[in-house]
Image (spheres, coloured by chain):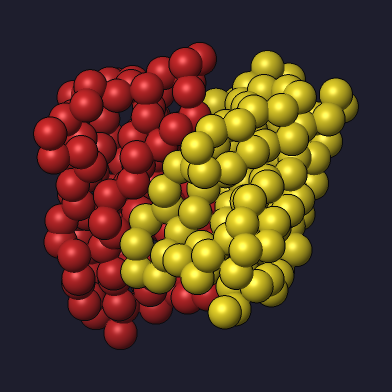
Amino acid sequence: NAGVTQTPKFQVLKTGQSMTLQCAQDMNHEYMSWYRQDPGMGLRLIHYSVGAGITDQGEVPNGYNVSRSTTEDFPLRLLSAAPSQTSVYFCASSPAQVDSYEQYFGPGTRLTVT
Amino acid sequence: LAKTTQPISMDSYEGQEVNITCSHNNIATNDYITWYQQFPSQGPRFIIQGYKTKVTNEVASLFIPADRKSSTLSLPRVSLSDTAVYYCLVGDSGTDKLIFGTGTRLQVFP
């Protein structure tokens, strides 16, 4: 059981470039989410999904797209990177919310945009 | 969206009990209130969750008053390894969004 995996662990982008952060879980969890954490700050919800084919916006969705074609995968796409998107990105998954809010977090992706 | 407030930081000494309170409004009526611990360069780790009154597990207790406008995480007899940032997590009223609190940085001294 690998839990929640994220790739890459580190990434440097130039302004205007696009890329996809990968997230996968092998626990058959319905709920998945993406958070960003700026240095010394808390976690802010970017996008989330309550099941395959269903996604919705969080607190700070601008500049990001998501899709959920399978239960296991929830990639986050940066459309046109900006320095303000320099952050650590965490993916998380949890069972259906009616059961628990216990979220399992991946190790994070540290992104720098120059 | 749901709003949360936590103290920015707290200091304690080994062996003491620490209570961290999160104030929250506009949270979902029937959802859990959850607390997480985060060490530097790691993702948050689940500590405890509850719906109302008091919940206790092997590492912490959680107190939630009847109005559910706040919750208090209680860590008994803290040790140096409890130095971390602690977050509450609540469900937003009317949506499926899970919103983290602002976080409390706990420093435990010998």
Q: Is residue B34 above or below residue A44?
A: above
Quarter of the picture containing the C terminus of chain B is: bottom right
Q: Is residue B44 above or below residue A94?
A: below
Q: Residue at x 20, y 60 (%)?
A: A19
Observer able to see residue A62 = no
Q: Which chain is yellow?
A: B
Observer able to see residue B16 = yes
Residue A83 in percent (x, y) is at 39, 78
How many numbered marks, from 0 up?
Answer: 0
Q: Residue at x 73, y 23 (%)?
A: B52
Residue A25: quarter of image: top left
Q: Residue at x 59, y 78 (%)?
A: B109
Residue A12 in percent (x, y) is at 21, 77
Q: Along the horizontal axis of the image, is A38 left or right of B68?
A: left
Q: Residue at x 25, y 37 (%)?
A: A74
Residue A10 in percent (x, y) is at 20, 71
Quarter of the picture containing the N terminus of chain B is: top right
The one of B97 and B38 positioned closer to us in this rendering: B38
Q: Along the horizontal axis of the image, is B104 left or right of B21?
A: left
Name, please, the residue furthest toward the bottom.
A114
Q: Which chain is red?
A: A
Q: Is residue A109 above or below residue A106?
A: below
Residue B71: quarter of image: top right
The one of A76 and B13 positioned closer to us in this rendering: B13
Name, please, the residue furthest toward the right.
B67
